Amino acid sequence: MEELILVRYGEIALKGGNRAFFINQLVRNIRKALKGIEHRIIKDRGRILIEMQVQSGDTEEAVNRLKKVFGIVSLSRVIKVEKNLDTIKQRALAIVAEQQPATFKVESRRADKAFPVNSPEICRQVGAFILENCQGIRVDVHRPELLINIEIRDKAYIYMGMEQGSGGLPTGTSGKSILLLSGGIDSPVAGWMVAKRGVELEAIHFHSFPYTSERAKQKVIDLARVLAGYTGGIGLHMVSLTDIQSSINRHCPAEQSTILTRRFMMKIAGKIAEAEKALALITGESLGQVASQTIESIYVTDSCVDMPVFRPLLGMDKVEIINRARNIDTYELSILPYEDCCTLFLPPHPETRPRLEKILQSESHLEVRPLIEQAVETREVLSI
């Protein structure tokens, strides 16, 4: 008897001629996720099997890591036995004896059509054997307390139920994008949602040191580390906005400072995206949530970059975003009370309906290019 993890993928199976590309990338991501755990990966007819060293005790840890790998829809801990009906019966009976359910059901899938017993007959014979050898148990085909699954492949694989994966597409199959990671609730969720579609992430965090603290920096690093658990790793660019915000405060109307700062962020992100060969930016904006997220503000902000800007949270309200943040384990970090550069210099009455021509006029009083170049050149890059 051997213990394995059975991995299932969803929409990858619909990729036609490109399916092998997606599967191979998923296998690479699984291998990266299981680094440090002894295992062997087997690709087999629409499934991926991971053989574990049972004595190592790492199966639970492996399952927890794999549940975060994008592209995996579900997974099960399975037992591999000889492809022999008597052996299958005995093992299924042992499972029932161990679990002691009041009701059960047997389901079967015969991937190896050369096996002489078809799926319905496997279910019938295994179920009858359990009923004959266990007292006080009955079959419930609708809501069984215990569901025994049997798959016939090169061997027989027996498992009970399944655990949900993160779904989506494997990281690295949809190009690269730059996430503007603020440290708040929204941006980590936005990054997670785009990464789920196979996008490789790089992240940029803008700070105003020494006005923002080392604890605020560590908070963002910790958020990036949570996201890296899903993506396999993230490059984190720490960019200072101190000189830029000081210049804006000296030369521009206070009510425009938020939108002007936002435009600098987008321009800097665009420069870094070009250097990192990323093709899009990602932000956590939700339409109408704050002053910089009105449709007018978004229009003025987007006018300064020549690449797509993904805003997956645009139509979500705060409750929906918070629920997703809790599900992906970023919420508790995001609410730590450390100020970021956006809240630190927030004017009392920010402009909510900016006009592009007025913003451009204010920018003309700033040394835009030198400020951007200095911010890009002095950034700190961390590998998370």
Image (spheres, helix red, strand yellow):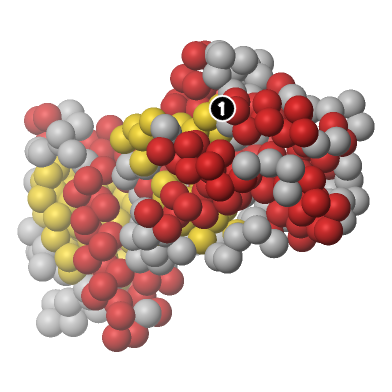
Residue 18, horizontal then vertical, whole percent: 30, 80
332 vs 147, left or right, is right
Residue 117, horizontal then vertical, whole percent: 19, 77
- Above or below, 221 against 170 in this view is above
State the residue in front, 13 or 384: 384
Say what secondary structure mark 1 lies in: strand
Q: Quadrant of the C terminus?
A: top left
State the residue in front, 117 or 50: 50
Res 365 visible: yes
Label 1 CA crowd tier, 10 Å (few <14, some 14–19, many 20+): many
Q: Which residue is mark 1?
A: 207
Image point (85%, 36%), residue name? 253
Residue at the limit of the structure toward the bottom, as seen here: 17
- Above or below, 109 against 277 in this view is below
291 vs 11, left or right, is right
368 vs 25, left or right, is right
Residue 236, horizontal then vertical, whole percent: 41, 37
- The image quadrant of residue 122 is bottom left
- The image quadrant of residue 275 is bottom left
Image point (63%, 25%), residue name? 340
Residue 169, horizontal then vertical, whole percent: 41, 63
Label 1 sits on what residue type?
Answer: His
State the residue in front, 214 or 88: 214
State the residue in front, 151 or 306: 306
Image point (18%, 39%), residue name? 35
Q: How many marks?
A: 1
